[in-house]
Image (tube, rainbow, N blue to C red):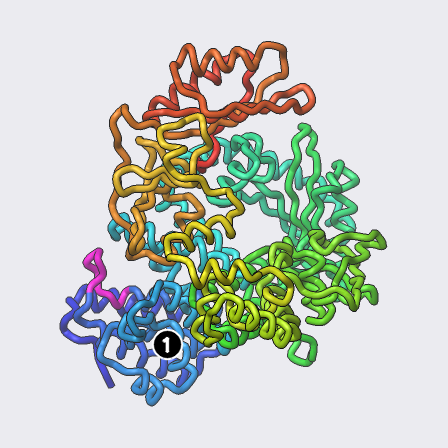
Amino acid sequence: MMTLPDTYSNEEKLELERQFGELLRCWTTRKNEQDLESVREAFLLAANAHKDQRRRSGEPYMYHPLAVATIIAGEMGMGRTSIIAALLHDVVEDTEYTLDYIREHFGDQVAQIVDGVTKLTKEDFEEGVRSMQAETFRKVIMSMSYDIRVILVKLADRLHNMRTLGSMPHHKQLKIASETTQIYAPIAYRLGLYKVKIELDDLCLKYINPQVFESVQKQLCEVREKKLMELEEFLAPVKAELEQRGIKVRTMAIERNVSSVWERMVKFGMSLDEVYDAYVARIIIDCPKVEDEKIQCWETFAVFTKYYYPDNKKMRDWVSFPKTNGYSSIHAVFMNKNGDWVETQIRTERMDETAENGFAAYWKYRDKNSTAESGLDLWMKVVRDLVQQADENQASAIEFIDNFKLDLFNDEIFVFTPKGDKITLPKGSTVLDFAYNIHTDLGNHCVGANINKKLSPIHTELRMGDQVEIITSEHQEPQEKWYDYLATSSAKTRLKNGIKEFRKAFKDKGKTMLHEFFDNAGIEFSKQNRNTLAEKFNLANRNDLYYFVATNKIGQQDVENVLKSSDAHWSEYLVKYLTLGIVRPSSERKNDKSEDKTEESSVAGYVISTCCNPIPGDDVVAIQLPGQPIQIHHPDCPEAQKLMSRYGESIVKAHLQFGDDFAFLATLKILAVNKMGFGATLFDTITNQEKLDMQAMEMKIEGGMVVATVSVYVNNLKTLENLIDKIKKLELVKKVERVGKRV
């Protein structure tokens, strides 16, 4: 049997054995002698395979797979096969050992998991692959669709990498953190691995926006003792009465994680003091019988209402309608004796374990005798369907990621059919999504719906608990504009197929008409000319071309403009055809600040992205894609994170610094008391006192308050900060925040 090689020092050998002992201690599932022997064999194989490798910190690389295996065993509650796969997850990728060797010594399941988490390399593809990150992620998801343990090992691997990210260079930190926040943290959430999810979120914020992370963390620390004490006082009378009733409970006062608090501050434009659910009261019921859980949860809710007023608009019933990841709780908001709202969670011990440990708790509590599919089974079925659709449609890796995020990362809602059957859909789904979810023909012929007995159009967004009856017409046919009404990729795929089938009926008519157009123009009716015409109009195939001709969307003049005109004339014609005159020559806009800005402002090979409007003095990240100017973003800009998660190798070092000759657009949102003359005072402060050029100013009256949105040109961050300070000092102003940047 293998032993630890001498490339490790004696101290490192002792540390490896200590970490392996910790792994065994954390391993709480079945552990017979054969299991222990197999895991030790995997440990020694990995230690020998990685014997010459070191992490950037200087530590032996073997510390990493040991840490991943410990997360799998201790934090996810998985067993022998997953632990062995975690120990060996980098062996095939980084050493001379092959997948066949792994399969021979540890079996097909371990080999399949290791293969699933092994990164792809450029050698695996022909030239021209757009994103290795996207291709690797697609491989992980496809493997996960057959064995959920693939993604669990990948999540454990990512969690340890994030915990040790401090030793990496900054551009690598941004790449890995962006991948994590865009892809891996949402997957952890959907699998119910809440503790993993919130730690990943916090670590991402720490590296993407360290100033914000430190600021929010400091603010939480300052109010922690006071807030936790208030929650204990809030819970005390409820706990005492429940125990008098014979219901045994335990209570917890919980501080939300930093990234969750920050997300609320940004979403609602609030300070920490205004975020009522930064601290949460949780009451956990000891209820041994599953059949009694709902009754005891609602009895607990009733006791709360005896002492405190509830806000019924903010109540969420995840006990009657558990999420697909198994999450169950009653979320309610009550007003305490001080007049403050308190977020309250009511759940049983089983619900709490499922909420914290997700997948592992699912295995522990699942009913082995039940034939009903669990939420996880249903979610995995959607994953497999998505993989199958991607294969059938030959979707690129990036399209696959977009569809995966669209269908499986959004929160979910439950709606009902007229017969009372429950349908689960992503939040944001519409009547048309519902129709296509039921049946393709129902979607293709949908003209509207009765939502809770009220007639509604096909683009109506559905809400939790709606009852939906689809209305169809044999005269309705699927239309391209419907893509804008759909929120799920599965519905979009069915719409695409519906349009394809519908257009086939116009083939003969369109082909005959097109032949006549070609004859009239003296153009050969060749396959090449027809393909050219379809390509110029951005049509998928010749059937689409025949449909457009048959329905008079392409006529005689269009054919001649494309096939008989010069390339220069055609380009000008196509722009006009596609944009309906929206595009103007750049000379009309040059050096004209009074005009609306184009989507990006270019400076010497760079584009300053207006999705987040960075200005000199901000932290920035630069992303250089092939054949495009470098894009400058804030590191925490959602668009930047999406790009970095796909093209991490394209991140370049950047520091945004320009002379005073350059001006950058910044937008402020100002909340003030509505009083005559405020607009004039604000205008005077910006233009006369601060001498700044204003691009736009909009004011709306909301009750006794006024909301002003002001866009100004500034040279750098210091100029903008001076302006904000000046506006905050105005008598009527209550709040000033910068729009388009998450700080």
Q: Residue at x 35, y 86 (%)?
A: 103
Residue segment shown in magenta:
54-63
Foreground residue, 179 or 346? 179
- Label count reads 1
Foreground residue, 549 or 171? 549
Going by the image, does 361 lie left or right of 653? Answer: right
**Where, by quadrant of the figure, is residue 614 drawn?**
top left
Look at the image and tell me whether residue 27 can be seen: no
Q: Quadrant of the C terminus?
A: top left
Query: From the viewer's perspective, is residue 574 above or below residue 550?
Result: above
**Where, by quadrant of the figure, is residue 352 drawn?**
bottom right
Q: Residue at x 43, y 61 (%)?
A: 564
**Where, by quadrant of the figure, is residue 280 drawn?**
top right
| Local SS, label 1 | helix
Foreground residue, 353 or 650? 650
Going by the image, does 533 lie left or right of 691? Answer: right
Q: Residue at x 28, y 57 (%)?
A: 649
Task: Provide residue 260's location: percent of width, then percent of height.
Answer: 51, 44
Q: Residue at x 26, y 39 (%)?
A: 604
Q: Residue furthest right?
A: 453
Query: From the viewer's perspective, is residue 351 above or below residue 215?
Result: below
Query: From the viewer's perspective, is residue 721 above or below residue 168?
Result: above
Q: Residue furthest bottom?
A: 104
Secondary structure mostly seen in magenta is loop
Look at the image and tell me whether residue 235 can be seen: yes
Q: Quadrant of the N terminus?
A: bottom left
* Three-letter amino acid code at the position of disc 1: Val
Q: Residue beneath label 1, please?
A: 114
Going by the image, does 61 lie left or right of 219? Answer: left
Task: Provide residue 545's location: percent of width, then percent of height.
Answer: 55, 68
Task: Provide residue 46's location: percent of width, then percent of height.
Answer: 27, 75
Task: Provide residue 682's location: percent of width, then percent of height.
Answer: 51, 15
